[in-house]
Image (cartoon, grey):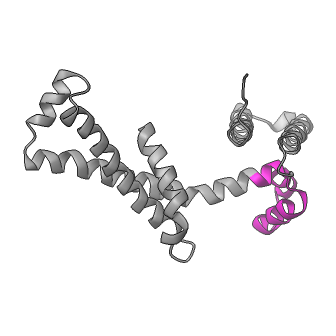
């Protein structure tokens, strides 16, 4: 799976823009996911079958495959990867936008607005944290403090489900920060 994700990332970086039809990322993701899955399966089969690397039962399984077995080994993996990466590319922009809005303070500031999307986009355009790690961390901490204050203000109406949702939102913000700014030790 790691090889498949790495190959998908390389394919998307190298060919994603040239294959994209009118900004439609999900079909490009599906196509490149399909190719990455077939390629990854081929790598594994070459390692096990040709170079005789890996467990004996795996090498035997590859040596004894019929034509139907080869199709059965490749097609389900390729189709499921096409679906996975197609959905991944389809959901990535709105999730990223929501995280940007959260870091800019728009999710909390636009709650209850008549046009939430327009309000959120305004927050993103005018209050988005800068590209530095410090600016994004400062925005994350500010957002967490704003939400904590809001919970204190309405604590009588807050249920455990609200705290769970808040915890998930904070976790997503924190993990997004970590993903965009990995910590390097020595």
Question: The C terminus lies in which quarter of the figure?
Answer: top right
Q: Residue at x 68, y 54 (%)?
A: 96
23, above or below 155, in the image: below
- Between residues 114 and 2, which one lies in front from this camera angle? 2
Question: Does any portion of residue 27 appear in the rendered image?
Answer: yes
Question: The N terminus lies in which quarter of the figure?
Answer: top left
- Between residues 103 and 64, which one lies in front from this camera angle? 64
Provide residue 153's location: percent of width, then percent of height: 92, 38
Q: Residue at x 48, y 44 (%)?
A: 6
Provide residue 13's location: percent of width, then percent of height: 55, 57
Q: Quadrant of residue 116?
A: bottom right
Judge whether residue 145 is colored magenta.
no
Question: Does any portion of residue 113 appear in the rendered image?
Answer: no
Provide residue 51's location: percent of width, then percent of height: 23, 32
The number of callouts visible is 0
- Between residues 122 and 39, which one lies in front from this camera angle? 39
Judge whether residue 116 is colored magenta.
yes
Q: Residue at x 85, y 52 (%)?
A: 104
**What's the magenta region?**
100-128
74, above or below 181, in the image: below
61, above or below 65, in the image: above
Left or right: 49 as drawn, with respect to 47: left
Q: Residue at x 86, y 52 (%)?
A: 130
87, above or below 158, in the image: below
Provide residue 68's location: percent of width, then percent of height: 10, 49
Residue at far bottom of view:
22
Q: Quadrant of residue 61?
A: top left
Q: Quadrant of residue 34?
A: bottom left
Left or right: 118 as drawn, with respect to 1: right
């Amino acid at each position: 799976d790691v090889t498949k994700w790495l190959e998908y990332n390389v394919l998307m970086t190298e060919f994603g823009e040239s294959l994209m039809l009118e900004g439609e990322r999900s079909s490009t993701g599906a196509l490149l996911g399909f190719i990455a899955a077939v390629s990854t399966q081929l790598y594994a089969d070459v390692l096990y079958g040709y170079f005789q690397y890996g467990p004996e039962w795996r090498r035997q399984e590859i040596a004894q495959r019929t034509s139907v077995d080869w199709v059965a080994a490749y097609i389900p993996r390729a189709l499921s990867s096409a679906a996975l990466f197609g959905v991944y590319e389809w959901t990535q922009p709105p999730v990223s936008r929501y995280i940007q809005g959260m870091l800019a303070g728009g999710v909390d500031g636009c709650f209850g607005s008549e046009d939430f999307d327009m309000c959120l986009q305004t927050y993103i355009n005018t209050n988005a944290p800068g590209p530095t790690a410090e600016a994004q961390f400062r925005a994350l901490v500010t957002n967490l403090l704003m939400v904590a204050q809001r919970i204190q203000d309405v604590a009588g109406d807050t249920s455990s489900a609200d705290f769970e949702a808040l915890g998930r939102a904070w976790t997503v913000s924190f993990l997004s920060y970590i993903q965009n700014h990995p910590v390097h030790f020595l």
